[in-house]
Image: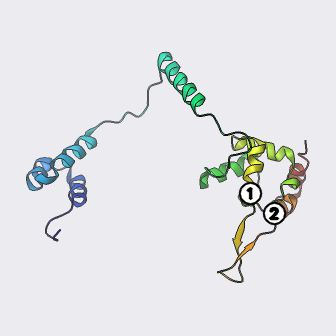
Amino acid sequence: MSAATPSRDDVLESFLLESDETDALQRYLRDYPAFAVELIDLAHQMRREIPDTVESFTPEERAAIDTALRVVGNAWPAAPAGSQDLFAVLGPADYGRLSAALDVPRQVVAAIRNRRAIPDTIPRGFLRRMAEALNGSIDDLLFSMGARSLAASFKAVDRLAAVEPVSFEQILIDARVPEERRLAIMAERD
């Protein structure tokens, strides 16, 4: 394609910027007939009004949705407890919400996710609260924490070294969790 012939994306972007001008659509359709369908579609999308609020479902619509979800749920059952990684679907913002819900610094959540905490040293009550915050079971959380992690060694970039897990209390200390809060968390034994 020569420099004199603009691409479809260039034409659409240019139209988007000039669309408020009088007769812009007619001018672009005349100048770029090869992109007529795309230009008309873009003009239609730009003029479409999007409501600020969505109306609630009627009871009949809600019942139909619930029925459909039940049918899908029966056809595609949930993974058995202890077989799903609860951390796999989390985004960066989710880690912030999780640390706020658990009232611990993000690095504590990251240490658990990265399998740096010895699972047996984490109080059962804390595990239960974390699993609930992740919408899973304790078995799922323990499964998520099960595998060992490899992290890059600072001595050599090319070598990977196994990170040795430490006690959960040590992770809280390293994260500078205040002593009163740390003792309260460690007392969450069921």
Q: Which residue is mark 2?
A: 176
Asked if labels 1 and 2 touch by Cβ distance under 8 angstroms, the answer is yes
At 17% from the left and 52% from the top, the residue drawn is 35
Picture residue at 69% right of the left edge, 44% below the top = 134
Q: How is the image coloured?
A: rainbow
Q: For residue 175, which quarter of the picture? A: bottom right
Residue underneath mark 1: 105
Mark 1: secondary structure: loop
Instruction: Give the image location of residue 140, x and y in percent.
Output: 73, 45
What secondary structure is marked by label 2?
loop
- How far across and how far down the image is residue 153, in percent? 71, 77
Residue 32 in the figure: left or right of residue 141: left
Question: From the image, which quarter does the N terminus lie in?
Answer: bottom left
Q: Locate residue 125: give its quadrant.
A: top right
Front one among 139 and 87? 139
Determine the CA span between mark 2 and mark 1.
9 Å
